[in-house]
């Protein structure tokens, strides 16, 4: 198991650069609102907006999660 993967969680889709908000919630065990709030407070959670879609950059999300644990 990788140090960046929490127990009982599978990593995001292999090879995926971006994941959806629902996938980010499942992977991080944090709600979408919490991830958005942390982004607004200056932490880079990997949140990106593509039009109306909210997606998360996988590597940035991993770095954020490893820094908060």
Image: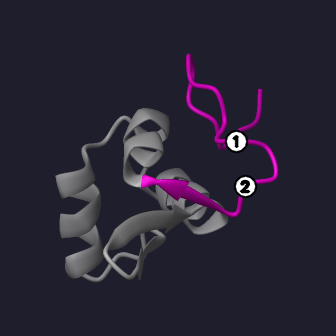
| Element on which disc 2 rests | loop
Closer to us: 19 or 38: 19
Which quadrant holds residue 58? Answer: bottom right
Quadrant, the N terminus? top right
Stretch of the chain drawn in magenta:
1-20
Closer to us: 40 or 15: 15
Residue found at the very far right of the displayed protein: 15
The percent position of residue 40, horizontal first and vertical second, equals: 21, 79
Magenta stretch contains residue 12: yes
Closer to us: 3 or 57: 57
Q: Residues within 10 Å of mark 2 (few under 14, many from 20)?
A: few
Q: Residues within 10 Å of mark 1 (few under 14, many from 20)?
A: few
Residue found at the very far top of the displayed protein: 8
State how many labels appear. 2
| Main SS class of the magenta portion in the image | loop
The percent position of residue 33, horizontal first and vertical second, equals: 18, 55
Q: Are marks 1 and 2 in contact (CB under 8 Å)?
A: yes
Rendered position, 4 above or below 8: below
Q: Residue at x 47, y 42 (%)?
A: 23
Q: CA distance from mark 1 to mark 2?
A: 5 Å
Which quadrant holds residue 44? Answer: bottom left
Which quadrant holds residue 34? Answer: bottom left
| Element on which disc 1 rests | loop
The percent position of residue 27, horizontal first and vertical second, equals: 49, 37
Q: Which residue is mark 2?
A: 16
Q: Which residue is mark 1?
A: 13
Task: Please give left or right for residue 28 compared with residue 38 in the image.
Answer: right
Q: Residue at x 37, y 82 (%)?
A: 51
Q: Residue at x 31, y 75 (%)?
A: 52
Magenta stretch contains residue 67: no
Q: Residue at x 46, y 53 (%)?
A: 20
Rendered position, 1 above or below 4: above
């Amino acid at each position: 198991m990788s140090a960046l993967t929490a127990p009982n969680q599978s990593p995001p889709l292999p090879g995926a650069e971006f994941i959806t908000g629902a996938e980010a919630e499942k992977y991080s065990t944090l709600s979408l609102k919490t991830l958005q709030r942390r982004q607004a407070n200056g932490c880079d959670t990997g949140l990106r907006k593509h039009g109306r879609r909210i997606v998360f950059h996988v590597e940035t999300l991993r770095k954020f999660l490893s820094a908060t644990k």
